[in-house]
Amino acid sequence: MKLGRGKAEGSQAEGCAGQTRQEGWRQGWESGEGKTVGTVKTVVVYLIVLPSSGSYSCAVKGFEHHPAPSVCIFPESCHRVTYTDRSICAFRGSSVDISCTYSSYESITSTFWFSPERSHQWQNPSQPEDLSEDSQYAGHVQFLDTEGGRSTLRISDLRESDSAQYHFTFKTQSFEWRSSLPGTTLTVTALQVQVITTTVHQSYTEAELKCLSSCSPAGRISYVWFKNGQKVMKEETSLYSGQFNPGDNVSCALKGHEDYRSPSVYAPKLPSVSVSPSGEIVEGSSVTLICSSDANPAANYTWYKENEDSAKASGQIFTITDVRPEHSGNYYCEAQNRRGRHNSTLYLTVVAGAGKSIAAGVTTAVLLSIIILSVFLWMRKKRASNQWSEAEERPDNRERTQPEGQDNPLYASVHFSNNHADPLYANIRSAQPHRHMEEQEVVQYAAVTFNRAGTAPRTRGQETEEDPAVLYSTVNKTS
């Protein structure tokens, strides 16, 4: 950024010289207080009338997070903060120094560092708070102020959660530095082992591995490799080639920071398989098979059914809808990555659906009812047949004792008395005018009274006993 004289009397101008003369770029001018004061087209030098004294910086529109260093128009009345690095990349477990220079024409009363990402912890979100008072940073941050207006924030034992933007601020009796310009962005990264190439043999795998991170710290870096927890000698570069068995674990770390190793890479462990819902699966429902395995890199999953060559599904979850009896059987899940493979098996049992069970139960109940009803009707018919046979025998006996000329005598009532020892026909009275006996084919009797002399009256139960010697005593005839 270049400073030049403006043409307006009593004003100053700044020029932001780009590295290209292409028109169409636009510059955003910001004062030390973080306010945009104007935008202009890019030429080589810009002449603008500035509203007030202070420090100013410019940036390409769309790249405001990468402004040019600020300058003061009147150094004797200027406040300014300049960061040494706009971005820093560091490994987990290491230490980092974030620095800046600052100046003010007034006496500075206080200085501190803060992180805007922690504003949700502040009592007033618009009022920054000292990072040294934040519990998250307790014990692993230091402020190093030196003479000459330089401040350093040192963060040790870095963690991924320390990745953030860090700002410096100072106060005077009448001023507080509150710029919206970015401070220093810190990225904390963990090492990772990447599998570059593999050649799988029957009992081992040949592989080339690389230790890397999401950013590349400056300077020459030495690495340390570990195989099954043991340090691999003579390997200090980011690449490592060798032969590995299926159960081997390999990791890497920065030399001098061996306690902060990368996650190990290894073949999938024995997969864990489960089914939901558990137990027997009802026909017509849905079932989900789940497979998981500990592996690094992450494993790929494939589902197979026993005695079938083609895969049934891919992925950790395999869902079967509208389950049928033919879905019963052994299923196995294969977990595979570039370090190896492993599989596990489960058995699926499908039972008849509730609807079919109910239908079968109803059918059985109906058949049983029909059988019981048939037996009942047969027994009733047989009993009726026996009673009918007995009834046919009694009229035959009575017909032998009836006078000739009477085919079917019908009795309305019969009365017994005990006046005769040998019952005989005593009297027959007609309820209607007398007709000749020969003109009637059917004789109906209204009342018949039997008398037996010398016998005591019988009870109701005794009356039911059959007496073969009984004779008609009184007969009342009705037409």
Image: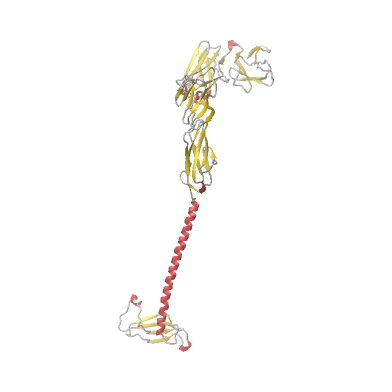
**Residue 272 rendering spot, x and y as whole percentages:** 47, 37
Given residues 265 and 478, the one toward you in this image is 265
Task: Indicate the quadrant containing the N terminus: top left, top right, bottom left or bottom right.
Answer: top right
Q: Where's residue 108, x and y in %?
A: 52, 13
Closer to the camera in the image, 95 or 9: 95
Label tally? 0
Whether 474 is drawn above or below 4: the answer is: below
Q: Residue placed farthest to the front in the image?
A: 202
Is 337 left or right of 474, judged from the image as shown?
Answer: right
Indicate the quadrant where residue 474 lies: bottom left
Q: 87 or 325: which is nearer to us?
A: 325
* Residue positioned 46% across, 85% down in the render: 432
Residue 443 found in image quarter: bottom left
Residue 145 visible, this angle: yes
Left or right of residue 51: residue 254: left
Q: Camera-side residue: 284 or 449? A: 284
Q: Residue at x 47, y 63 (%)?
A: 370
The answer to whether residue 434 is visible is: no
Please say which color scheme the image uses.
Answer: secondary structure
Measured as percent of width and height from the top left, residue 350 is found at 49, 47
Q: Position of residue 20 (x, y in %)?
A: 67, 18
Q: Is residue 402 above or below residue 118?
A: below
